[in-house]
Amino acid sequence: MTAPNTPSGLTDAQYHDAIQAVLTRIEATVDRWLESDVADIDSARSGGMLTLTLSNRSQLIINAQPPLQELWLAARRGGFHFRHTEGGQWLDTRSGEEFFALLSACASEQAGAALSF
């Protein structure tokens, strides 16, 4: 079976698996932070959307966009769209920044503490 003609080149199943891996990684990181008292972040997941609420009530929203095969991030800094690359990274469609690096920067800004996903 060949991949459909999509921006990411992933099949729908591969895209779904890649999104689930991202969301699971974020949730596991937040759980470790809570257990180690590094950061007080509440995470709520609904389907392909994960909302992180920081102790100051600011939020980061990570959302799957299946029709476009993108991953979106909404933060105080702005909204970002990421596409999956052959190398397995999610890169911003405008700046080329890697998803976890940008998520870490946005979370750190909003939390007022260094956080790295």
Image: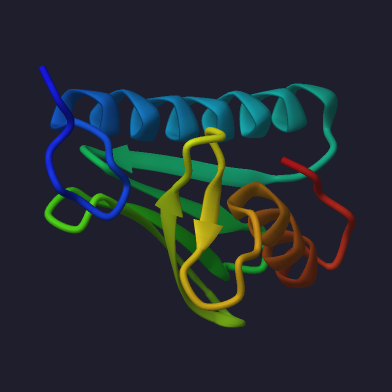
Identified at 84% across, 38% down, the residue is 38
Q: Quadrant of residue 46?
A: top left
Residue 63 as seen in the image, left or right of residue 74: left
Image height of 83 relative to 57, above or below: above
Identified at 81% across, 49% down, the residue is 115
Q: Position of residue 102 (x, y in %)?
A: 67, 61
Q: In which quarter of the image is the C terminus?
A: top right
Q: In which quarter of the image is the N terminus?
A: top left
Image height of 105 relative to 15, above or below: below
Residue at far front of view: 2
Q: Which of 103 and 7 is in front in this view?
A: 7
Residue 85 as seen in the image, left or right of residue 28: left
Residue 54 as seen in the image, left or right of residue 39: left
Image height of 18 relative to 1, above or below: below
Identified at 14% across, 47% down, the residue is 5
Identified at 75% across, 22% down, the residue is 35
